[in-house]
Amino acid sequence: MKLKQLSLFLENRPGQLVQAAQALKEAGVNILTLSLADTEQFGILRLIVSDWEKGKRALEAHQCVVNAADVAALEVSDRPGGLAEILGIIEECGINIEYMYAFTFGRDGKAILIFRFEEVDEAIAKLQARNVNVIGSVELFELSGGR
């Protein structure tokens, strides 16, 4: 139930984002969700894409520095307190969150959050034991409309 996320290390200067977006466009790889964090000199663009292997190859061919990492997509109640509830479960399980960001689609009163955990497999097992719905890549792709 893990997902592969691509992380790109980009210089903090004009044109870097468009180069990455153009590489994915040319390869026919759709971006399902993303997060961008920056510092003064560089940024980290994190992406969940429709085909991570094809996307990684396309980005590398455009001289992008790319890393693939395992992440988990968790279904969370889309209501006040939903985030606090899932974070409480994560804390009770003793799971460390490295970072998180939102997926742009949800369903039936549920939102989806992307989490990077220190130990992804262990975290998923603990969360599933607590009846947390972990979304797989096929299901996530379908939620995005199969784009």
Image: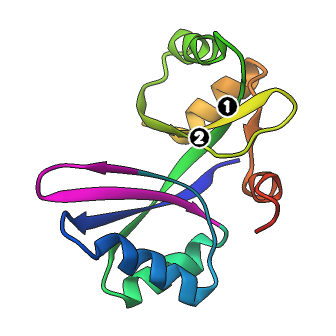
Q: Which amino acid type is marked by label 2?
A: Asp
Q: Which residues are magenta?
A: 36-49
The label shown at residue 121 is 2
Colouring scheme applied when the structure was drawn: rainbow
Q: Residue furthest front?
A: 14
| Number of numbered discs overlaid on the protein picture | 2
Element on which disc 1 rests: helix
Query: On the rendered structure, is 10 left or right of 87?
Result: left
Looking at the image, which residue is at 71% across and 47% down? 1
The label shown at residue 125 is 1
Q: Is residue 16 above or below residue 76?
A: below
Q: Position of residue 79 (x, y in %)?
A: 71, 16
User: Could you say which is closer to the camera, residue 41 or residue 8?
Assistant: 41
In which quadrant of the rendered view does residue 29 lie?
bottom right
The label shown at residue 85 is none
- Mark 1–mark 2 contact, CB under 8 Å? yes
Query: On the rendered structure, is 136 left or right of 46?
Result: right
User: Could you say which is closer to the camera, residue 55 or residue 23?
Assistant: 23
Q: Is residue 30 above or below residue 12?
A: below
Query: On the rendered structure, is 143 left or right of 54?
Result: right
Q: Residue furthest left?
A: 41
